[in-house]
Amino acid sequence: MTAIIDSNIEIAAALLRDGQCVAIPTETVYGLAANALDREAAGKIFKIKNRPEFDPLIIHVDSIQTALKYVEAFPEKAMKLARAFWPGPLTLILPKKKIIPFEVTSGLDTVGIRVPQHDLTLQLLENLKFPLAAPSANPFGYVSPTNAEHVIDQLGDKINYILDGGECHIGIESTIVGFEKDDVVIYRQGGLTQEMIEGVIGQVKVQTISSSNPKAPGMLTSHYSPLTKVILVKEPLTSILPNSGYIAYKNAPIGILPEKTFILSESENLFEAARRLYAGLRLLDAKKFNQIYVEMVPNEGLGVAINDRITRASS
Ligand code: TXA
Ligand code: MG
């Protein structure tokens, strides 16, 4: 069995109503979706991804109004962020209603929720009477998929249908934000920058690092990684080991063959770099080098999330 790649919302909806998993496009990365109100369907996601049960899923809805059906409370600052950035790459951690099964939230009484910014998936959600639980559509720990081909490469024999929505235009996962008493906390850097968030609600805390952070259980230090060893490049190198790949921000170092290099953004545009990072890691991973060098990018704006992923890939 190989998954069908197509853009038919009716077929995707029918499979999801039947309790099956379907890969869906979003603006960040492709998700592996199932009915979030059906514990059995959600359980299939963990199996297909080989994902540990302690790593909670986030759920996707079509609007703020629909989100209100699944959360007990929506703090004022959360509502301000939702109004400003949904649909968009922002996941809010909020207290869940009973209707969301603990299988989805890995036993937590909070749930991660977002409205994705993708027409096809928004139409799909409008056609369904339930929210979609969806982690990134990759085997646990590997690089996330940013097009339908990436999904079929890895999960093509485990699912029936991939809803094809083209290339993801952000290319890096959503920013995850939680609310602790009066504090707003970023648990995962992502497609929405800290500056954008602070522009709406003022100063926030950042708490993303550890593998054992109980507030973001799935955020392991080593994650988002290709099979090939990744070496982080903080300062320009003068030489590299033989049989290596090289991901550069703007310019490949002189002397490295073009087929061994991948440029993130010749114009030094961090949005373009984010959009291309995972495709670059996959491309060079397939060439089976002994190692892939990856340059860090300027640590500002979206660069913070890019550097986070590069660092985790190298851990
Ligand atoms: O952009 C995205 O967020 C993509 C697309 C498909 O929407 N999804 C995604 O899902 O990246 P996933 O499962 O790969 O990462 C979601 C992370 C989990 O690993 C976990 O760390 C965190 O969200 N999370 C989920 N529910 C949580 C909760 N209740 N409390 C704290 N962290 C939670
Ligand atoms: Mg993931």
Image (spheres, rainbow, N blue to C red):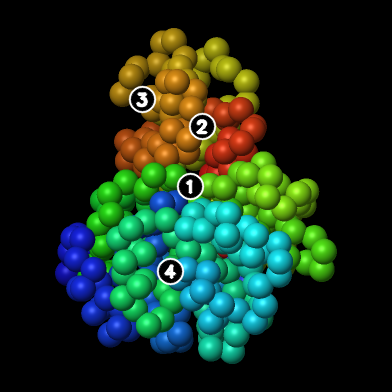
> Which residue of the protein is positioned furthest toward the top in this rendering?
254
Residue 80 to residue 254: above or below: below
Q: Are marks 1 and 2 in contact (CB under 8 Å)?
A: no
As measured in the structure, the alpha-carbon distance from the residue carrying label 2 to the one carrying label 3 is 22 Å
Query: Residue 270: which disc?
Result: 2
Tell me the residue that label 1 is attached to. Answer: 172
Q: Are marks 2 and 3 in contact (CB under 8 Å)?
A: no
Could you say whether the residue bearing mark 4 is in a helix, strand or loop?
loop
Between circles 3 and 4, the one closer to the viewer is 4
The percent coordinates of residue 293 (x first, y second) are 50, 29
Which residue sits at x=62%, y=20%?
235
Q: Where is ligand 1, by quadrant?
A: bottom right
Report how many numbered discs are placed on residues in the image.
4
Single out the residue that lies furthest toward the bottom: 98
Q: From the image, state whether disc 4 or disc 1 is nearer to you.
A: 4
Q: Earlier in the sequence, mark 2 or mark 3?
A: 3
- Position above or below: 156 against 234: below
Label 4 CB sits under 8 Å from any ligand 1 atom: no
Picture coordinates of residue 22 (x, y %)?
30, 70
The residue mark sitting in front, 3 or 1, is 1
Callout 1, which amino acid? Answer: Ile
Q: Tell me the quarter of the image containing the C terminus.
A: top right
Residue 241 horizontal/vertical position (percent): 48, 23
Give the vertical position of 238 relative to 125 (above or below): above
Q: Secondary structure at mark 1?
A: loop
Distance CA(mark 1)–CA(mark 2): 11 Å
Distance between mark 4 and mark 2 Cα atoms? 28 Å
Q: Amino acid at mark 3?
A: Lys
**Mark 3 nearby-residue class (10 Å; few <14, some 14–19, many ≥20):** some
**Tag nearer the camera, 2 or 3:** 2
Q: Which mark is residue 62?
A: 4
